[in-house]
Image: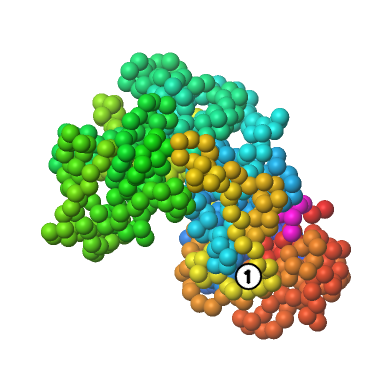
Amino acid sequence: MTTFNITINNKTCEAHEGETILQVAERNGFKIPTLCYMKETIPFTSCFICVVEIKGRPNLAPSCSLPVAPNMEIVTESPRIRESRKTCLELLMSDHCGDCMAPCQAACPAGCDIPGFIHFLLDNKPKEAIKLIKETIPLPASLGRVCPRPCETACKRGLLEGPVSICFLKRRVADVDLESNDMYIAKTAPDSGKKVAIIGGGPAGLSAAFYLRQSGHAITLFDAHPKSGGMLRYGIPAYRLPCDILDQEIGAIAKMGVTFKQNSVYGKGFDLNSLKKDGYNTIFVAVGAQVASAMGVAGEDEGGALSGITFLDDASKGANIEVGDRVVVVGGGNTAIDAARTSLRLGAKEVIILYRRTRHEMPANEMELEAAEQEGVKLMYLAAPTAMERTNQGITLTCIKMELGEPDSSGRRKPVPVKGSEYTLDASTVISAIGQKVDTSTYKMENFNLSKWNTLDVNPNTFETNIKGVFAGGDCTSGADIAVRALAAGKKAAIAINQFLKDENVIGEPNPFYSSMGEKEETPKEIFEGKPKAERAKMPELPATSRVGTFDEVEIGFNYETALQEAKRCLTCGCTQAGNCKTQDLCTEYDVKQERFKGARRNFYVDESHPNILYEAHKCILCGNCVRFCSEVKKMDILGFVKRGFDTVVKPPMNQKLSETRIGECLEVVDLCPTGALSHKNRFAQSS
């Protein structure tokens, strides 16, 4: 065999006559990406990702097929090469019709693997389901009750009879775990020797504690309240989230070895300096947003308006609250709804919610609104208070009618007062629930940088503050927001904190490439073909007439049969190979923009006839791996190219279904697909 030298990236390498550039490069430790190359088959040169520069040649050359020659000088990485590879990938992705991540999972702020846990639920594997859920959501029984369900808004089943009841299914899985004698407790790594102080026991703090403890760090959580949970405990009434559910979920975190120090108020007994002196290697601030915003109307202080969050806090602690006969709640968020429904339970005969926009703009969850109306709460839209006065009979609230003008910074149409439309409302109690903010007075003394919204200013990717070794997340950085986003912030911060503690480059959570079919309304209609009609399951509830005067949980929960039927409605969107996909990895590495080349996409086509293999032709990039492996290696006529040009597709011959071929005799072909066009029906299966 003739041997000679070539140069790769200025390194002299021995090469053999007949070898390709790619073979020599790989043997010498140089990584050249490719999608269509297989050692067992003749080079196909379809993806053009493996291009290199060769001295003396003006054009880039495919390394998988070009033979080496004596004294060849090769470069495998350069800006020109990277740009070429990126362009090739963007062209491949431009007609790739597939969602890497299910829309529901993409819409979940925590990124919960919803199709995954539903898969386990359908397989009656509750332990696997709860473990998968807790990879992203450490308080699923609580969130399954109170989350406003952004995942369900994105659910494609919503284009048919209604979205899958994702939150209720999550609650079912979590409740089964809590009721078992073997509750799931996340495993922890060996002691790392590092100490982390977490300030705040709400969703963000609990989430950070849960994930950091799994890495083996010693975690101490300092909480100003007698019990942890933050607004989940002190801002959400027990009829929505019973305290014993929250206690059990927090107890599972404690069993991992997290230390809780209750009634520990930052700035009163401890601060950053004292924590550092006590040996804490890093600090995570997660104090939430627990200061009520004022209505800003004349006579507000003298009139005695209660803040919504203080009112709910007192109610959660069992305080003796006299609300009188008629309560007026000002606001349109979930806090306003909770305050209204709580007032009824405390004895109010009439409860009115004033909201300055229409129902369409109301930020409260629609399901909570409907529940409030069922219980008798009255909603007055396009109304705002302008003044209040306490009288011998109670409180007189002066209001004005509103109309919607042009959109404001939030994108909602701005409410504008209607001149001369003032009127009065008499009330025994007025509750202000128009928003919450962060109390940053203590943190200003620590020289924290604050944002223009008066929240703690952090790096959005790493959650680092301007003080080295101090991180912050949750409502204290974002402003008042939903619990699931606070949980997500806690986990993301934990990733960055873990990098900091390991002396790694602190970059935060990876940001992989995700292919998308587009908006929900752009969903190919073929996805729904053959899907039997199945109405969304209704959550069994206490009768509305039985709720007043009690804080018993209203939503009773799905039983096993209902949960199973609802889980079957899932369309199993997303790609089973996401996170284990060669194309996705390369798109991430080369910062691919799928929308760069817009145009026609492949037709949606699914062959699910085989019991173990799913074929989704719309994801195919025509690399030819499956065709060539079957024919050249296995000597089987299983798959081939049909039609020409843009219309080319890979299919079995003679329009056969997969189930009619011998593909079951070479299941390894599934793992050769770089895009997930061929995949195992059981997403957790491994081919032999």
Horizontal side of residue 218 vs 72, given as left or right? left
Q: Secondary structure at mark 1?
A: helix
Q: Is residue 420 above or below residue 640?
A: above
Q: Nearer the viewer, residue 310 or 683?
A: 310
Q: Residue furthest bottom?
A: 644
Q: Residue 442: x, y in percent?
A: 28, 26
Q: Is residue 77 above or below residue 533?
A: above
Q: Which residues are magenta?
A: 681-686
Horizontal side of residue 540 vs 383, given as left or right? right
Q: Residue furthest left?
A: 420
Residue 683 shown in magenta: yes
Q: Nearer the viewer, residue 542 or 630?
A: 542
The residue at the point 44 percent across, 22 percent down is 226
Q: Residue 446: x, y in percent?
A: 29, 26
Q: Is residue 481 above or below residue 198?
A: below
Q: Residue 406: x, y in percent?
A: 24, 64
Task: State the image quarter where residue 136 is shown.
Answer: top right
Q: Nearer the viewer, residue 569 or 542?
A: 542
For the stretch drawn in magenta, the main secondary structure is: loop
The residue at the point 32 percent across, 21 percent down is 267
Horizontal side of residue 116 vs 156, given as left or right? right
Give the residue type at disc 1: Ile
Determine if residue 494 is in view.
no
Identify residue for label 1: 527
Q: Residue 517: x, y in percent?
A: 54, 67
Determine if residue 537 is in view.
yes
